[in-house]
Amino acid sequence: MSVLSFEPVTGTVRVVFAGEVVLETRNAVRLKEGGLPPVLYLPREDARMECFRRTTHKTHCPRKGDAAYYSIEAGGRTAENAVWTYEDAYPAAAEIEGHLAFYPSRVDAIEEITP
């Protein structure tokens, strides 16, 4: 089983969808998990949640727990199941509980802006 490692992201992370900023934060966390590409997890309180619609899609990770999904709706566009979150993460993943992660291919951009 791979080990999870977390590191705070310095600077701002901005997620753009349909030309609109749907999330901007200075409190992102980068998760590294084994040989997988790193994933940014962003606090839900920094998201424009009116652009997010909960779906019935769910997945399970043996290291992090059960993931729930959201679609993004903005600018007349929809990206189905583009966002996932661990609302009741396992203790090893408590640092990302309630944060949102985005599939890069389903949004216009995930920008890291360094100070």
Image: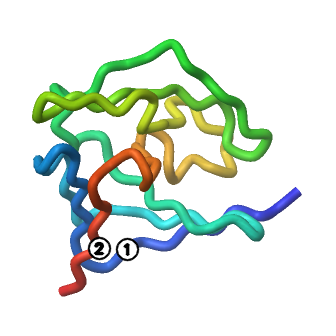
Side of 13 relative to 61 (left or right): left
Give the number of callouts.
2
| Viewer-proximal residue among 70 and 61 | 70
Mark nearer the viewer, 1 or 2: 2
Residue 28: image location, x then y, percent: 35, 62
Q: Position of residue 7 (x, y in %)?
A: 50, 73
The image quarter containing residue 45 is: top left
Q: Nearer the viewer, residue 51 or 91?
A: 51
Note whether residue 46 is visible.
Answer: no
Whole-Å distance between the Cαs marked 1 and 2?
9 Å
Compared across the picture, whether 109 is left or right of 74 comes to right
Q: What is the three-letter code of the residue carrying label 1?
A: Val
Circle 1 is placed at which residue position? 9
Give the quarter of the figure containing the N terminus.
Answer: bottom right
Residue 36, percent from left and from top: 69, 65
Q: Residues within 10 Å of mark 2 (few under 14, many from 20)?
A: some
- The colour scheme of the drawn protein is rainbow
Which of marks 2 and 1 precedes in the sequence?
A: 1
Q: Residue at x 39, y 45 (%)?
A: 106
Q: Is residue 41 above or below residue 111?
A: above
What label does residue 67 carry, if any?
Answer: none
Name the element at disc 1.
loop
Which residue is found at the position 71% from the left and 31% from the top? 60
The image shows residue 76, relative to residue 10, as above or below, that is above
* Amino acid type shown at disc 2: Glu
Q: Nearer the viewer, residue 98 or 103?
A: 103
* Residue sitting at x 16%, y 26%: 50
Tell me the quarter of the image containing the C terminus.
bottom left
97 lies left or right of 109: right
| Residue 112 circle label | 2
